[in-house]
Amino acid sequence: MNRTTPVIPQEEIARQRAYCAEIRALNARLERAPAAYVDTYGCQQNEADSELLRGMLAEMGYEIVDTDRDADVIVINTCAIREHAEQRVLGNVGALVHGKRRKPEQIICLCGCMAREQHVADKLRQSYRHVDLVFGPQVLWRFPELLRRVITRRGRVFETGDVPGAIAEGLPVRRSGRVKAWVSIMYGCNNFCTYCIVPYVRGRERSREPEAILAEIRQLVEEGYKDITLLGQNVNSYGKDLGEGVDFPDLLERAAAIPGDFLLRFMTSHPKDATEKLFDVMARCEKVAPVIHLPFQSGNSRVLSAMNRRYTREQYLEKVRALRARIPDVVLTSDVIVGFPGETTEEFEDTLSLIQEVRFDALFTFIYSPRKGTPAAQLPDPMSKEEKSANFDRLVEEQNRISLEKHQAYIGTVQRCLVDGLSDDPRNNLNARTPGGRLVHLSGDPALVGQFVDVEIVDCSTWALFGEKR
Ligand code: SAH
Ligand code: SF4
Ligand code: F3S
């Protein structure tokens, strides 16, 4: 079998970088370096994409700033996962019209998952005339060319059509942190869970070459990064399109063999594809953090089937058992949807009992939000909003109790934590993470940021642990 995903030829990437140089030359004529602001919504994939956008903008001679106020270029990298996320973006983009009145030469761009929704593109075209450039995630690598088109023609540009995804290597990147880094290993999704918009807006699954990924990780480690997260909508199907016989556990094991003091994480894992081979690699490789985000979505097998998740409650629980048999203290986090169309209160009770049985360390809870074009949006949805919210509140309350108990069990233990940033709290000026990724507040020398330190856990809340450096 051969590789089925096209790779963008390096000449094409060189052409994009030539556009960067062209814009840089234009910018160099200005009195001061123009400013660019990139605002990110949604998941870590979008965070990683924004680091590429900033890399390209920096190469074009823009100073990267952290406010849209007076920026010469504003890029809004959007998320379409729930209605609420979209409303927030549209509200914020709408408000940008005032800044642009003061600064008419400002360029406003909207990209990311919302850009691929027809109704959003139509709305932007008709009612948000201050937005100059709209482009989807599949053409992110062509941003220099598209921006140049806006600058030189002063017209609006829409590149929102359905283009097959490809892999673009060799784009400049400007990372946001110096301790933690994201590495996208694949893009898109083939799973078509019936509630989810991602496969429609991000396209089919496509994997980067293992060598390109490993080279990037090696470089990050050399630069001193200590915490590296491998990203994909379903990392467990990594490599299927490569035809090389390399799967995700193989990639993870090879990444963990890179010399240096660092931790590897990954997300997200679809339970149907999380294998014992993966759990074995996690157990075997010290550099793979003992944590997994394994979204279950529902504890009821009928609902899971209606969601097209392709596992049952029992199969999910079996995966958790297989994992805990190998890594007893593994940190387990998950996503769940309350109020999927047709979910009854009894079926919701199964979700509640599943979290009691598994006892996740943390849970991301969502109320179902219908997405245009997805099969679930067509299903009858008789349960009232009030009833859904009441179920949601019960779930959150129960999980908070479990999270607190889980945190209490850390008290008195010593954890090797990575100090990953400063906090605003003067009594606990440092933030750190346990190997399993739990947040720890402690006080200490700011120079410890980027170092692993032994921390004794002395207190906790539902959301965080409090520690003292040993
Ligand atoms: N690829 C990841 C999930 C990406 S979206 C995975 O398969 O787990 C993150 C989470 O958003 C999902 O796990 C799901 O719980 C939630 N989500 C997705 N679509 C949703 C919708 N239409 N309404 C409510 N929550 C949704
Ligand atoms: Fe969406 Fe399902 Fe793909 Fe996750 S696996 S991105 S929930 S379709
Ligand atoms: Fe949102 Fe797109 Fe990520 S819809 S969750 S930004 S893949």
Image (cartoon, rainbow, N blue to C red):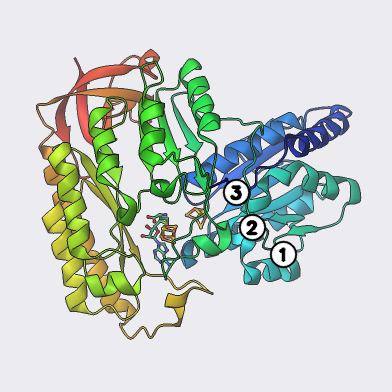
The Cα–Cα distance between marks 3 and 2, rounded to whole angstroms, is 34 Å
| Residue that label 1 marks | 128
Q: Say what amino acid the circle numbered 1 marks.
A: Tyr
Q: Residue at x 47, y 44 (%)?
A: 239
Q: Is residue 279 left or right of 79 when viewed as pictured?
A: left
- What type is the residue that disc 2 sits on? Val
Viewer-proximal residue among 62 and 70: 62
Residue 156 is marked as none
- The numbered disc on residue 93 is 2
Question: Which of the image's four quarters has the C terminus?
Answer: top left
In this rendering, the answer to whether 105 lies above or below 284 is below
Q: In this view, does 449 lie to the left or right of 15?
A: left
Q: Which residue lies furthest to the front in this view?
A: 1
Q: Nearer the viewer, mark 3 or mark 2?
A: 3
Sort mark 1 into few (<14), some (14-19) or many (20+) by Cα contacts within 10 Å: some
Q: Helix, strand or loop at disc 3?
A: loop
Residue under label 3, please give it: 5
Image point (41%, 20%), residue name: 258
Residue 337, image quadrant? bottom left
Identify which amino acid the numbered label 3 is placed on.
Answer: Thr
What SS does tag 2 mark? helix
